Image: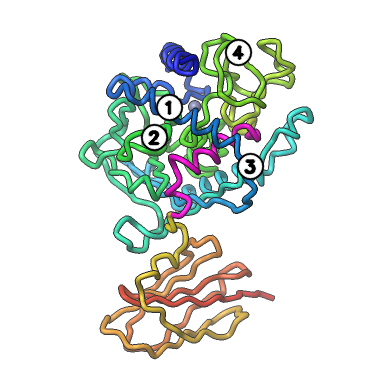
Amino acid sequence: MKSQAILVAIIIVAFALFSNNLKAQQHRNCGTMEYLQHQIQQDSTIVQRLVDQEAAITNWKKNAHQEKSIIRIPVVFHVIWSMNVHNISDAQVYSQLDVLSADYRRFNADTANTPNDFDSLAADIEIEFCIAHQDPNGNWTDGITRTQSNKSAFDMSTDEAKFTSLGGHDAWDANYYLNIWVVPAIVENGMGGILGYAQFPGGNNATDGVVIGYKYLGTMGTATAPFNQGRTATHEVGHWLSLYHIWGDDNGGCWGTDYVDDTPNQASYNYDCPTHPHTSCSNSGDMFMNYMDYTDDNCMNMFTYGQKARMLATMDSLRLSLKTSGRCQANAIGENKEQIKFNLYPSPASDIVKLEWNFITNEKFLEVRILDLSGRVIESMHIPTAYNTAEINVTNFKSGLYIIQIQNSAQIGYKKLLIQHQ
Ligand SMILES: [Zn+2]
C-alpha cells in the first residue's frame, strides 16, 4: 500500500508541476507524468497495474540474470506533417535511431563527461534499436510512415497523434514494435512547450509508444538546440521501459522516488547544465547528467545499473514479446518466401557490380536493394525480370560491406558485397 500511495502522490504532484512549466520553451518539459494522470482519470485500474509492475520488477531483481544477449527493439517512426518542414528526412530519423542505440549501449561519445564519482554507476543497458523492416502485414518497410495531416498541433490528452481518425497515424502492433510518432507540435489545453511524452508499460496497445516534436528528434535537419542531440527520445524511451524521473516527481521535496537505489535522492529537476556537484536532499550531488533529469541534450550522458535492472525486468515482463519480435532484420520478411540464388561480381568492387540470375518468376519486375549492415536501404531499383541481369554503379558508395537483396513478392535472395575504393 505504501508503494501505491507514493505512486499516486507522485502523479498528482507531477501534474501540478507540469502545469507550472508549460511556458518554459527553452527548458526540457516532458509530458509523461501528466499524460499518465489523464490515462488514470479514464481508467483507474492503471494504478494497480503500475503497482503490480513494481512487484514484478522487485521479483526480477531477486533472481540472477547471467544471460548476456543484446536485445534489439524494432522501431517504427510515424512522421505526421502539415507543412513540408515537419516532414523530416530519412537521415534525420535514422540519426535518432543511432543516438538511441549509442545511449542504451553506452557507446555515446560524451561518456567522458560523466563525473568520476558516478562513473562506476553508469551502465551499458544492452538494448539496441533497429529500424523495423517488416510491417504489420509482413511486407518490407523502411520503418517510416509518413502522413500528411491538416493538424499542426497534436493534443496529448486525446492522443491525436496516435489515431488516423484524429489526423495522426494508427500504432503498429505494440507487441512487436516501438512506435515513435514525430509531430509538428504537442499541446495540452492549447498550450505547447512539450518536447515529448511516453506511455508506461501495461497500458493500451493502441496508444503505446512515444510522441516527440519534430524539433527535438535526431541530430540534424529540424533538430533545434539545446535539444538537438536526440536525448528527448532517450528520455522518453526510458519512461516506456518503466523509468521515472530521477528526482521522484515530488515538486522539490525529498520524499519522492524513482524506485532506483543507485540514483541519489534529488529534490527537483535540473534545467540547462549545472556544474557538478549540484547538491540537494543532503546528497553529495544530483545526478543531473542522467537521461531521466531535465537537463539539455549535451548535458546528459548516462543511465545507472539500477535503471538498467528496471528496464531489463520490463523487457522480461510486460515487453517480453518485443524480444523475439523479429521485425528488425530485413531478412525476417524472407521467412515465408522462397529463397533464391543469384551471382554477383566482382567483390570487392569499386565501380560496376553485375548481378545475374536464372530463377523462374511470373512477375515482370524484381526489386534490387543495396542495404548497409544495419539494414538501411541505400539504394533500390526495379529491374525487368526478362533481363536476368542487372548492373549497379557503386562509384559513389563509401568503401565498406553492403548487402545486396533481390526480391519479388514471393522470392528473396541475399549476397554480401564489399566495396573498396583505392
Ligand atoms: Zn520525462
- Is residue 308 in view? no
In primary-sequence order, the first of circles 2 and 3 is 3
Q: Report the Cα–Cα distance between label 1 and label 4.
A: 23 Å
Viewer-side residue, 337 vs 416: 337
Q: Residues within 10 Å of mark 3 (few under 14, many from 20)?
A: few
Of the image marks 1 and 2, the number of the one nearer the N terminus: 1
- Neighbour tally class for label 1: few under 14, some 14-19, many 20 plus, Cα within 10 Å: some
> Where are the magenta residues, as a range?
301-324
29 to 125, vertically: above or below: above
Residue 173 place in picture, x, y as percent: 33, 48
Q: Given contact means CB atoms under 8 Å apart, are the residues at marks 1 and 2 in contact?
A: yes
Residue designated by label 2? 202
Q: Give the residue at the far bottom of this rendering.
A: 358
Q: Amino acid at mark 3?
A: Ala
> Which of the image's four quarters has the C terminus?
bottom right
Tell which tag, 3 or 1, sits nearer the viewer.
3
Identify the main secondary structure in magenta.
helix
- Which of label 2 and label 3 is nearer to you? 3
Color scheme of the displayed model:
rainbow
Tag of residue 267: 4
Among the two numbered marks 4 and 3 on one chain, the one whose residue lies closer to the N terminus: 3
Q: Which callout, 1 or 4, points at the residue further toward the start of the chain?
A: 1
Q: Give the spatial CA distance, label 4 vs label 2.
A: 28 Å
Dot 4 lies on which element? Answer: loop
Give the label on residue 64, or none: 3
The kind of residue on which mark 2 rests is Gly
Local secondary structure at mark 1 = helix
